[in-house]
Structure formats: C-alpha cells, structure tokens
Amino acid sequence: MSTASTPALASGSSTRGQLNGILFVALFAAAVTSLASLPAIAGLGMSPLIVGIVAGAVYGNALRDGMPESWNAGINFSARKLLRIAVAFFGLRVSLQEIAQVGLPGLTVSVLVVVSTLAIGTWVGMKLMKLDRDTAILTAAGSAICGAAAVLAFESTLQSRPHKSAMAVGSVVLFGTLSMFLYPVLYHAGWLPLDTEGVGLFFGGTIHEVAQVVGAASNVSPEATHIATIVKMTRVMLLVPVLLLLGVWLNRAARGTVSGAAHEAADAARSHQHGHEHTHGHTSGHAAHPKARKIAVPWFALGFLAFVVVNSMHVLPAAATQTLDTLDTFALTMAMTALGIETRVSQIREAGPRALTAGLIVYAWLIFGGFAITWGVLRIFH
C-alpha cells in the first residue's frame, strides 16, 4: 500500500511545488510592477517587462540557491505556457480600424522595416558576428517588430534557451532607450527633414518598444504621437504572419535534417549490403520518405489575431478591455521575470559583445535604412 501511494504523494508534492513556483513569480512580478511605476524608471520608458527580466536575472544569479528545487516547474510554466497565453491577449491592444487610419503609407513602412530588419539582423548575427541561429533571430525580431514582446513570442516558437532571450532583450533595452532621447534631439536640431506624418511614420516604424515610441514622439507633438503609436501597432500585427512563416521554415529545416540523417543511414546500409538489390531498394525508399516533423504552428499567434478581430468589433466594454490589458501586462511581466530567473550571466558572457555589436549594426540600419524607407514611401504616396 505504501508503495502504491508513493507516486500519488510525489505527484501531489510536485503539483504543490509548481503552484508555489507560480505564486513566487507572481509576487515577484507584483514587486517589479510597483518598481516600474516609480517616476524615475517610468520616465526612462522602462516597461515592467524589462524591469522584470533584469530583476529576475539578478535574483537568478545571486540568490537562486535559496529557492526550493520543486519550484522550478512553476517558473518554467510561467516562462513557457503563461507566456503563450499572454502574447495571444496582447492582440486586444490593436484594432483594424486604427491600422486603417494610417493607411497604405503606414502599412508599407511597417512591412518594409520588419522584413528588411529581420533579414539584415539574422544575416549580421549569423554570418558577421558568428552568433548561433536562435540568438541572431531573437535579436533581429526584437529590433524589427515590438521589442521584448516579440523576443518572447519568438523564444516560444524557437524553443530557445532563456539566456538567448535575455541577450536580445538587453539589445532592445539599450538601443530602444537611446532612441527615446536621440530621435527628438535629431528632429529639433533639424536633422530629420520630415513633416508630422513623416515623424510619426519614422518613429513608429523604427523604435523598438511601444512605450519607447510614445516617449520619443510625445517630445514632438500629440499628432506625431498618435500616428507613431498606430504605425507601431501595425508592426505588432505583423508578428502573426512572421511567426507562421517561422513555424513553416523550422519545420522544413527539421525535415531537411531528418532527410539528411535518413540518407546517411541508407548509404551505410548500401555499403554493408551492396550485394542485395532488394534490401538496397527498400532502404533508399525509406530514405526518400523521412518522418516529417509536426509543423510548429504558433497557436498563440492565431489567438493574437483572433483578439485583434474581437477588439476591432468593439464587443467588449472599454473597462473590460482595459482590465484585460492590465492583467496581460502582468502575465507578460511574470513570463519575463521567470525568464530572468532562468538566465545565467556566464552564458550571456560568451556571446555578449558579439550580440551587442549585432544589435548596434541593426540599430544603425533602423536609423538610416528606416529613414530612407520613410522618405521614399512619403515621396511615392504624396
């Protein structure tokens, strides 16, 4: 009887450990949210998400040994499953009507910036800076789409290690915060020959985080802030098709790997049994049809799209949408904090300077390439 009850006791203990881990992350995220609301931190455009990953990383590296091992399951749940749910609910911040307001110029700038930045960022990271594939893609995604939230969404689809996300978020924090101060200075100094619409397109199309876009554009005018925010949300919308394409690409890459392994097995079989035609034929037939990997469809991205549609239909009261947005920010903060706790400084140190250099090159592209795209689009549509 005692033997039979052992698995049940172990199961109950692990469930309690997981719940304790989730509760710990929730309390940690609540403290982070309070910290992020302080004027000194809020004034820097530091969202709770960014404060969360920094505070989590400090705890994870300095005090992690004091945390019970059984809580790890709860931290993993917060960094993975809760993250997917929170990214889906992020769709309630975007509406199709808002995107229609900026029309074709806003959509064109967003698409060109996102596609070019993802391509250039991934190439620079992998080829120029010799970063691993996941770190290169995460850094490019954070710069191209919507900062920390994009890094989280891509991390979930790539199933990469937490320290790679931390490096990408570090790049977003550094260069996005720099943009908040640099862009308004460039505009007021007369170095950005753009009208209000142009400023909105440029700021919204090239600055990393939503909060950073608002912070920078509010130093120009309310009209520029309105346009910049909508253009930024258009970039956020592009998260869905990009994630779906990434899922298809990962599936093809995995199938290629499986196919290569199958062909190697076939070659080995041929070398051992080159006298047996029947066995040879059977083996090469097997090689031609490798077992396909299940397509990595990011369902949370489809959930994101569904919530965009719900928000566009105005079926939810404004108070309900606002409450869900607040809860969603808190859930994303929990996910970021959990990722921070799982991050190890020693892992970051290995690729730190190269990852930061890759982020800097992508940032230079966002400024100069983004300006060229904005200027060209304005010339075409006006």
Image (cartoon, rainbow, N blue to C red):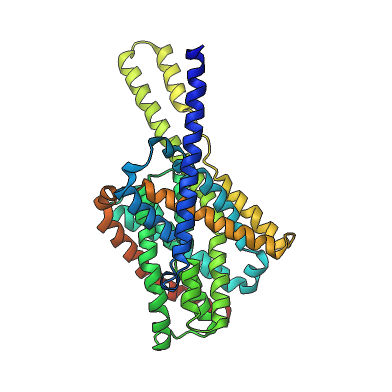
Q: Residue furthest right?
A: 315
Q: Is residue 138 above or below residue 379?
A: above
Looking at the rendered image, the quarter that the C terminus falls into is: bottom right
Q: Position of residue 199 (x, y in %)?
A: 50, 80
Residue occupying the point 38% across, 10% down: 276
Q: Position of residue 108 (x, y in %)?
A: 55, 69
Instruction: Choose between 48 and 8: the one closer to the eye.
Output: 8
Q: Position of residue 168 (x, y in %)?
A: 37, 56
Number of numbered tags placed on the structure image? 0
Q: Position of residue 1 (x, y in %)?
A: 51, 11
Q: Is residue 270 above or below residue 216?
A: above
Residue 145 seen in render: no
Residue 318 seen in render: yes
Residue occupying the point 33% across, 42% down: 66
Task: Name which quarter of the figure residue 222 lies in.
Answer: bottom right
